[in-house]
Each structure stands twice: as C-alpha cells, then as structure tokens.
C-alpha cells in the first residue's frame, strides 16, 4: 500500500477520534500482510498475532481517552473518615487483558494523615481487579483450569490470548473466582414466575453420594490414629488400613422428573430386564438439574443442602418428593431425619442397579463359572423384585443356600450379604409403584455427577489437592454443571466491586460524579 494512502486513511480516522489514525493504518497494513500469505494457516497466523496487537491498541486508546477526561474532585473521603484533598495525576497501574497488557492512568487522592493510603476513584469506576489480571482473562483462566490440569490451562490461555500465566497464579485465580460460590449457592437460583402449571407439579428427585479425592497430607481428615502413625506391617508398601490418602467429596443433586412421553406406554419390568434390540425405553428424564458438592463438610450438610434446594423449588409442598439412594443406612437415616424435621413426606427408593449387583453375587454361588444359566437366573429374580415379589426372592435364595450349601467362605459371605441387603432394603423396593407413576428407579444422575463433577477433574493422575483448592474447584464445577455460571459471574463481580472499591469510600456518590 502506498504511503500517501496510509497517511490519508490515518488522517481521516483521526478526524473521527484523536489517536485512532495509527491503529487504522496498522489494520490496513495487517490486511495487506494477510493477503500476501499463501495458505489459510498463514493468513490466520498473521491476522491472529497482528489483530491482537491492534485490539490492544484500541483498548489502550479508550483507557487514555477516559483518563484525559477524568474530572478532578474537590475531595474524596474514605471509609476511614479521612478527607483526601490533594489530587495527583500521573499515577498508573498495569492491567493484563485477553488482548495484552495495557496501562491505566488515574488520579490519586492523598491526605496529610499518616497511614491513610491513597484512593483512586477511577479504579472503582472501572472495577479493576485487585491484581493485574482483568475479569475477562480471569474467567477464561478459570474455565480452562476447571476443564483440565493447571498445566493444560496455562497452555490454552497462552494459545488463546498470548498471555502467559503461571500455574501458581492459575490456582490463585481459581480460588479467588470461587470466593462467593457458597453464598451464591445458599441463595439458590431464582424461580421463574411464568413456569407452566404442569412443570410446577413434576415429581422432585433428590440424591446424594460421595467420591474420594486424593489430598495432601495436611488436608486429610483426622482419625483416631492417622495412617502415618499406624504400625507399618511392610517396609516397601502400605498394607490394609495403612492408606487413607483420600478425602470424601460429598455430592448432591436435585432435579425435576419429566414423565415419559404421553403417547408411549410406561416401562414394564419385562422391558427393563429383557429389552428388545433396537427399542428405546419410554422412561422418565431428569431435567433442570442442580448440583452441590462439598469436601470440607460431612454428609449431613450435603443432605441438608439438597433439602434446602428442593424446598425452594416446592415451597407449597405440592409436589411428590423422591429420594434415590444406593442403600447406605446412614444416608437413609439422614434423609428421614431431614424429612421429619421439615414435615415433608419423602418416598425413598433404593437403586435397582445395586440390587442387581447383589443378585449377581448370589448367582455366582449357585452356578458353575461361565454358566449361561447365571444370567437367566438373575433376570428371573430381577423380574420378581420389579413386580414387588421381594419376599419370594429372599425365600428362594435362602432355600437354595440350605439345599446347596455354598462352597467356601466367600460364597457363604456373599449369600449372607445378599439376604441381609434385600431384607433391610425391602421397604425401599416399591418398584411397581415407581414404574406405574413413571418415576426413576436408579441413581444414574448422582453416579454420573460423581464422575463428571469430581473424578474427571480431581482424579487427574498425580493430582494432590489442598482443602481450599479442592473446594474452590468443586464449587465452580458444580455451578457450571447446574447452568448457573453466567449468573454467578455477574454476582461475583458485583461482590468483588464492593469488596475492592465501594467499601473503601465513605460516600458512593463521589464515584458517581
């Protein structure tokens, strides 16, 4: 491009906005350079690298124009009550954004009182973060850190923005991003006032489970005798009861149960146990899911949280509440205690997949290895249980154990466990009513949550977590999985604005001026 053409273009741009001319000329040069590239990859590389610099220049120009127009206030009074009347221009600070580093100029207001720090009203107007990283860059860094390891996040941020952030800084950014997560989750998501009547009456399902997370030694739960203090049976490896490097992340889920398609038939026990090839079961669907996960508190706190969320969804107690459990007696007791304390009738259903696992354990005790009849036997017992004939299955297994005593202590133990499980969980195996009403009979939602919320990120090979770092990561992953990430970031930035800026001033009208 001819030099006089660039000069004319820059002069026209400067007539629109002073200082815009060099940026427009640079953009024209970038277009010429991209046209000279041969391949698409070459063009893309030129535009990406050069375009980022042009955008950084636009951002710097905007900041400079606002800095030149910043009014000088007569005085600024801080939250400490000290009046600052001395204004000094020429102060600036660095800000690292998604398009590069920029310099923010602003007026400093000082006083003669010893120990009274300077105030920068423009920092509050711009809502600058406490350190150099901008909010957009922080959100990108948190998103990348939430999806993979901190090392991978560093590479992704560098590739997307050209900004290099250290792994330790990424950990700090993630922890800072979750500063308001607990309060946000306690407030709950706002209910839509225009929800359809049928949606308000959908069954409400609650479920909870736990997943172990490998922790650093100082973050592990205290026991009567820590693993490191126990008597070592072996010198080169840890034995039974000598491990314990994990801490349980308690996870909870609340969701609406969308009934099967009105045009289709409800699932039958035969369709569940003997599905036809190529057919799809007309089962219920979990919609409007909400998750919570906590590694600092116990299971009782998680159960309380899911009841709080369910109460926010159904304040009038018009919906059917269903608690899906894996059979843990302590968990069932906590659910019953919460329901009794709140005066809410809750239907508890044990996970049918767990029931099948116990039936398979019993089947191995009565059949030779690799006998095809094992699967048929399990199917028959599962059909009886789905039809409500749990007592018949218990009697049948007990009679088989008497007629054909299991060989070996392991088989005898499996028979005892199966019988005890079915007898203890019989009140929670009302599958005929669940299938007739189109309710779920499995804990797939919470089992999946333990994998994609906890294990997929926290279980990365070699990862060892501190307690604050693990909790911050779990909070952010739960908020994202619940679909509340945008709402949370708006809330978080508002809270940071108050903490970092508004709380330092005695009169917020000063900032408005």
Image (cartoon, grey):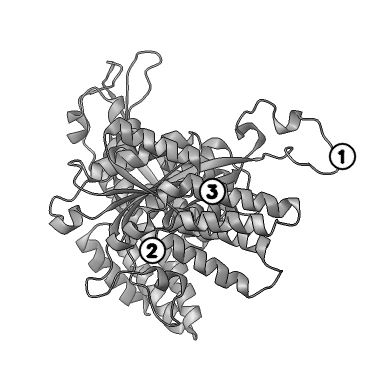
The residue tagged 3 is: 421
Q: Mark 1 or mark 2, which is nearer to you?
A: 1
Q: Residue at x 58, y 48 (%)?
A: 167
* Dot in front, 1 or 3: 3
Which residue in the protein does label 2 denote?
Answer: 54
Q: Residue at x 63, y 53 (%)?
A: 415
Q: Residue at x 64, y 56 (%)?
A: 401
Q: Residue 7 vs residue 144: left or right?
A: left
Local crowd size for mark 1, using a 10 Å CA cut-off: few (<14), some (14–19), many (≥20): few
Q: Which residue is mark 1?
A: 235
Given residues 38 and 464, the one toward you in this image is 464
| Position of residue 26 measured from the top left corner of the image (x, y, whole percent) | 38, 68
Q: Which mark is residue 377?
A: none
SS at mark 3? Answer: helix
- Distance from Cα at disc 3 to Cα at disc 2: 68 Å
Q: Depth check: 79 or 27 in front?
A: 79
Above-or-below relation of 7 to 327? below
Mark 1 / mark 2, whichever is N-terminal: 2
């Amino acid at each position: 491009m001819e030099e006089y053409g660039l000069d004319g273009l820059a002069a026209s741009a400067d007539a629109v906005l002073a200082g815009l001319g060099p940026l427009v000329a640079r953009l024209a040069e970038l277009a010429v350079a991209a046209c000279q590239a041969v391949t698409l990859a070459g063009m893309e590389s030129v535009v990406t690298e050069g375009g980022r610099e042009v955008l950084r220049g636009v951002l710097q120009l905007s900041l400079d124009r606002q800095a030149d127009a910043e009014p000088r206030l007569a005085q600024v009074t801080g939250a400490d009550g000290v009046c600052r009347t001395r204004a000094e221009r020429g102060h600036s600070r660095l800000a690292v954004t998604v398009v590069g580093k920029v310099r923010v100029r602003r007026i400093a207001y000082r006083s003669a009182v010893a120990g009274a720090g300077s105030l920068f009203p423009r920092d509050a107007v711009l809502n600058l973060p406490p350190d150099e990283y901008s909010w957009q860059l922080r959100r990108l860094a948190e998103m990348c850190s939430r999806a993979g390891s901190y090392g991978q996040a560093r590479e992704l941020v560098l590739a997307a923005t050209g900004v290099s952030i250290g792994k330790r800084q990424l950990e700090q950014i993630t922890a800072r991003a979750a500063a308001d997560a607990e309060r946000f989750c306690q407030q709950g998501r706002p209910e839509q006032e225009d929800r359809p009547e049928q949606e308000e009456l959908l069954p409400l399902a609650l479920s909870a489970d736990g997943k172990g997370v490998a922790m650093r030694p100082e973050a592990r739960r205290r026991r009567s005798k820590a693993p490191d203090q126990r008597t070592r049976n072996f010198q080169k490896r840890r034995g039974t009861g000598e491990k314990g490097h994990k801490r349980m992340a308690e996870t909870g889920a609340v969701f609406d149960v969308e009934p099967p398609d009105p045009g289709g038939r409800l699932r039958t026990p035969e369709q569940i146990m003997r599905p036809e090839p190529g057919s799809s079961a007309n089962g219920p669907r979990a919609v409007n899911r909400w998750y919570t996960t906590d590694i600092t508190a116990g299971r009782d706190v998680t159960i309380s949280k899911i009841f709080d969320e369910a109460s926010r969804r159904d304040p009038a107690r018009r919906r059917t509440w269903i608690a899906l459990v894996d059979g843990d007696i302590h968990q069932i007791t906590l659910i019953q205690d919460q329901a009794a304390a709140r005066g809410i009738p809750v239907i508890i259903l044990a996970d049918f997949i767990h029931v099948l696992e116990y039936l398979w354990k019993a089947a191995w005790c009565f059949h030779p290895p690799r006998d095809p009849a094992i699967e048929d036997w399990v199917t028959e017992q599962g059909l009886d249980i789905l039809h409500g004939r749990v007592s018949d299955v218990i009697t049948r297994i007990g009679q088989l154990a008497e007629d054909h005593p299991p060989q070996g202590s392991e088989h005898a133990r499996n028979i005892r466990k199966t019988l005890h499980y079915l007898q203890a969980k019989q009140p929670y195996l009302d599958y005929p009513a669940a299938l007739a009403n189109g309710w779920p009979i499995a804990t797939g939602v919470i089992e999946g949550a333990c994998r994609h919320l906890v294990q997929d990120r926290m279980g990365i090979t070699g990862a060892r977590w501190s307690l604050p770092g693990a909790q911050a990561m779990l909070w952010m992953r739960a908020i994202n999985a619940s679909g509340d990430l945008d709402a949370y970031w708006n809330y978080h930035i508002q809270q940071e604005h108050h903490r970092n800026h508004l709380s330092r001033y005695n009169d917020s009208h000063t900032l408005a001026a």
